[in-house]
Image: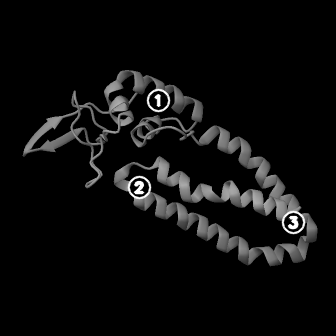
Amino acid sequence: MIFLFTATFGATWLTVPWLYPAEIFPLEVRAKGNAWGVVGWSVGNGWLTLILPVVFKALGQKTYYIFGIANVITLPMVYCLYPESNQRTLEEMNLVFASDSIWNWEAEKNFAILKEQNPELVQAAQRGNSVIDPETGLPMKSGRGMSLDVNGLSHHNGACEEKQTFKHG
């Protein structure tokens, strides 16, 4: 049974700290975000490795109940707090995380509104034309001056122009 659990866990949840941060962080902070995701995983894994012999000595096989409870708690947490990233571009993920709410369903509602308000951003990304400069990680100028620039300003050729930001509220 433990072998089956380990095989299933390794093929599913073990990939999350390596893949999910790479999909959800904006390009300008993706490397740091992914690194911190792996650091968090490593710290948790190291802590668990050090504490488990003590726990097994004290609780014996009842220790597995702790893992079972943790898995049961994780299911609603993931459902409520982790937005789906499957088949979404990186630019679309920026729109998903533009919501002020931590709840997944609110983020999805906000994403639908922003996607409808800014179709050129989503269409450009779907055509393979990035709206993020891959060299700098900063937003590039798009058709109507839309950008994910959190400062709301863009500097092109020495000129400073105001941009519309993706804040819904």
Q: Secondary structure at mark 1?
A: helix
**Residue at the spot of label 2:** 30
Residue under the point 54% across and 55% down: 19
For the residues marked 3 and 2, what is the alpha-carbon distance in whole angstroms? Answer: 36 Å
Quadrant of the drawing holding the C terminus: top left
**Residue at the spot of label 3:** 63
Quadrant of the drawing holding the N terminus: bottom right
For the residues marked 1 and 2, what is the alpha-carbon distance in whole angstroms? Answer: 20 Å
Residue 4 position in % (x across, y down) = 83, 60
Q: Say few, some or many: other residues with alpha carbon within 10 Å of mark 2 (under 14 / 14 to 19 / 20 or more).
A: some
Residue 50 position in % (x across, y down) = 72, 78
Q: Say what amino acid the circle numbered 2 marks.
A: Arg
Q: Which mark is residue 111?
A: 1
Image depth: mark 3 or mark 2 in front: 2
Q: Please identify the quarter of the rendering in which residue 131 is found.
A: top left
Image depth: mark 1 or mark 3 in front: 1
Q: Say few, some or many: other residues with alpha carbon within 10 Å of mark 1 (under 14 / 14 to 19 / 20 or more).
A: many
The earlier-in-sequence mark between 1 and 3 is 3
Q: Please identify the quarter of the rendering in which residue 39 is found.
A: bottom right
In this rendered view, identify the residue nearer to me: 59 or 148.
Answer: 148
Residue 81 visible in image: yes
In this rendered view, identify the residue nearer to me: 81 or 130.
Answer: 130
